[in-house]
Amino acid sequence: MAGEPLLAVRDLRVDFGRRRAPALRGIDFDLRAGQRLGLIGESGSGKSVTALALMGLLPETAHVEGSIRWEGLELVGMSDGEYTKLRGDAMSMIFQEPMTALDPTMRVGRQVAEALRLHGGAPAGKARERVLEMLGEVGLPDARRVADSFPHQLSGGQRQRSLTAMALINRPRLVICDEPTTALDVTVQARVLEVLNAELRAVNAACLFISHDLAVVSQVCDDLIVMYRGELVEAGPLAQVLGNPQHPYTRGLIATAAISAVPPGQRLPEIEDFWNPDDGWNHHE
């Protein structure tokens, strides 16, 4: 049916270990084709757990309840073998830590080409050509050297851009980005975001963009959801949420991000400034 979400998340709950420490507390959101949804919140709010749950990459200690439906197909409880058919083809993820996401024993070009080999059946020559093209698009001018290198031979920024190329090379319909520009300088960051936007538009793909950087989120996203302690506390169009935040936590995030606007000598704002120990969130300005 037209207008149905590509991805529908309902009452998603995740906890870990025998004591069932909660990481996600019943979150709900939709992602439609072409939509770019930003996900913000402080460290520990549940952003990366959400991304890993969507990709079926949580550890065995995780207990997952609720529903994640991809074009009507239920993903919660799906076997890893079934998930593998989706990962790298229908959906992909740009990870925050390239040194842990990349195989240290395999040359980067081979890793970038893996999605093409597994899902596209591309001949070796065509795959190599596409890898070099994609590495160039994400701002790596010496693409051949990068492709023939091992991860430890590259800088942090080069590794991060290689991960971006890997996630985009098969033109998935959903791209999950977990702090994808953290290791990049502003010039390369702008180039990578330009490529990401172009690739998303080319196939009308959806994007879930996780970041601490509100300026970066504003360059990519149309809509925004705010997480705090495993819950979604605010959601809406990006301009509305940032321009007229309703939840005190959202106001706190925006205030703490605007460090450059604080006069010299004045105390920087903290999230705790928006929290009343007796009554909870302080809803007064």
Image: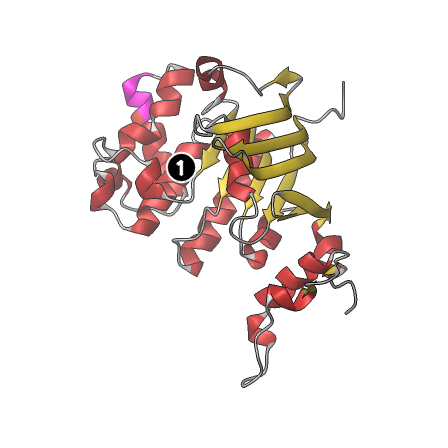
Circle 1 sits on which residue?
A: 165
Q: Main secondary structure of the magenta part?
A: helix
Q: Is residue 165 left or right of residue 52?
A: left
Question: How far across and how far down the image is residue 61, in percent?
Answer: 45, 28
Secondary structure category for the residue under label 1: helix
- Seen at 31% across and 42% down, the residue is 99
Q: Residue furthest front?
A: 19
The answer to whether 162 is drawn above or below residue 110 in the figure is: below
Q: Which residues are magenta?
A: 123-127
Q: Is residue 126 magenta?
A: yes
Q: Is residue 74 above or below residue 177?
A: above
Q: How many dots with numbers?
A: 1
Residue 215 x/y as whole percent: 57, 58
Other residues around mark 1 within 10 Å, as few (<14) / some (14–19) / many (≥20): many
Residue 113 highlighted magenta (yes or no): no
Image coordinates for residue 91, horizontal then vertical, percent: 52, 27
